[in-house]
Amino acid sequence: MPQTPTDHARRRHTLRAALASHEPALDAVLVTNLDNVHYLAGFTGSNGALLVTADGEGDAIATDGRYLTQVAEQSGDLRAVIERDVAKALLVEARAAGARTVGFEAAVLSYADHARLSGDDAPALVPTTRLVETLREVKDDGEIELLRRACAISDQALAALVEEGAIRPGATEREVARRLENLMFEFGAEAVAFETIVAAGANSAIPHHRPTDAVLASGDLVKIDFGARYAGYHADETRTFVLGEPADWQREIYDVVARAQAAGRAALVPGADVRDIDAAARSVIEAAGYGEQFLHGLGHGVGVEIHEAPTLGKLGSGTLSDGAVVTVEPGVYLPGRGGVRIEDTLVVRADGPELLTRTTKDLIAL
């Protein structure tokens, strides 16, 4: 179910309500975060900005001449302004539409650009925080279908990697990572969601290890964190394998992480506090005596960005909404020995979370 101009127009309409309730009320908002531009207008070029006005009459998208054809194809329901300085061009449009107060994304617009765009003839620029990102927390059916497809591609690629015997003693981390990425492309990914992590042996105890020429060896834990991107939406999945017969300590920490991950998944209910979800999984690991070896939060939102709201962790805030898409990814990391992480991408549902990454979570010995 691809995204349509109707989907984007509906999201802009929802954003308009936020302009009216903002303090102070806003006549328009200037969107310069490219992920938010994509979400609201469908445009995927590298230079773009969007103006959303309170009455909808002055809505416009700006980009430069390189994207003249692309903006017509992707955002044909919007009036396009072709200028290199997209933010300035849209402020001119806002002033022409009678806007006196224009919100800007405070986390995106630099101090220097704010100074450049402010002036006697410019609308008053008002900082806003997470206006669009808050809307993005709840995915619509079309977004979930794209995420479902991205996760299916990821599962297919990992299954093919295992079937062809690429995760084996003698291969390097980098070779395994590149092969997995190539398989994702073969199964329909438009890109990889992030740099693939393949971490073998002692390297598996490093949560975000980057693949090297380290050689996989019999007895190693092999942690693989990866995902496909499809139509702008990201998958995120981690599985941990063992080469040969698992040692007792490997079985032990794998079992602990698997039980913690199951507890985290079970806690994904609408209205749950994000800190409580983290605690549900973390308490399992702490009870097993590995609390200090769980080094990160439990998970995060996934969508047009690989890491977006909400954050599931001790430092997170807020509650889960029905339709949010999040990861659950506890881990135990033993420096110098190895580590285990198990991660899924899931949709929060009233009747229980929908699992999008469906590769088995049983410990697989290769």
Image (cartoon, grey):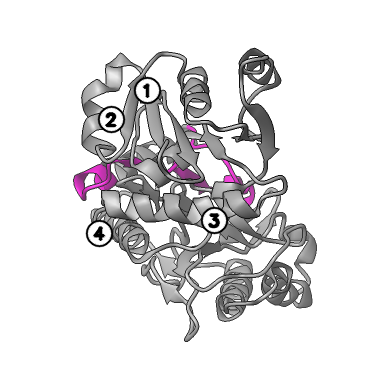
Which of discs 3 and 2 lies nearer the camera? The answer is: 3
How far apart, in angstroms, are the residues tagged by discs 4 and 1? 45 Å
How far apart, in angstroms, are the residues tagged by discs 2 and 1? 8 Å
Q: Which mark is residue 63?
A: 1
Mark 3 Cα-neighbour bin, 10 Å: few <14, some 14–19, many ≥20: few
Mark 4 or 2, nearer chain start: 2
Mark 3 or 2, nearer chain start: 3
Q: Residue at x 57, y 76 (%)?
A: 268
Callout 3: SS: helix
Mark 1 Cα-neighbour bin, 10 Å: few <14, some 14–19, many ≥20: many
In the image, residue 196 lies in the stretch drawn in magenta: yes
Callout 4: SS: helix
**Residue 270, position as x, y percentages in the image:** 58, 77
Mark 1 or 3, nearer chain start: 3
**Residue 40, position as x, y percentages in the image:** 41, 45
How far apart, in angstroms, are the residues tagged by discs 3 and 4? 51 Å
| Along the line of sight, the residue nearer the viewer: 345 or 86 | 86
Q: Are marks 4 and 1 in contact (CB under 8 Å)?
A: no
Which of discs 4 and 1 lies nearer the camera? The answer is: 1
> Is residue 168 visible in the rendered structure shown here?
no
Quadrant location of residue 26? top right
Q: Are marks 4 and 2 in contact (CB under 8 Å)?
A: no
Query: What residue is shown with label 4?
Result: 163
Query: What residue is shown with label 2?
Result: 71
Amino acid type, callout 1: Thr
In the image, residue 217 sits, relative to residue 76, either above or below, namely below
**Residue 338, position as x, y percentages in the image:** 62, 54
Q: Split into 4 quadrants, where in the image is the N terminus?
A: bottom left
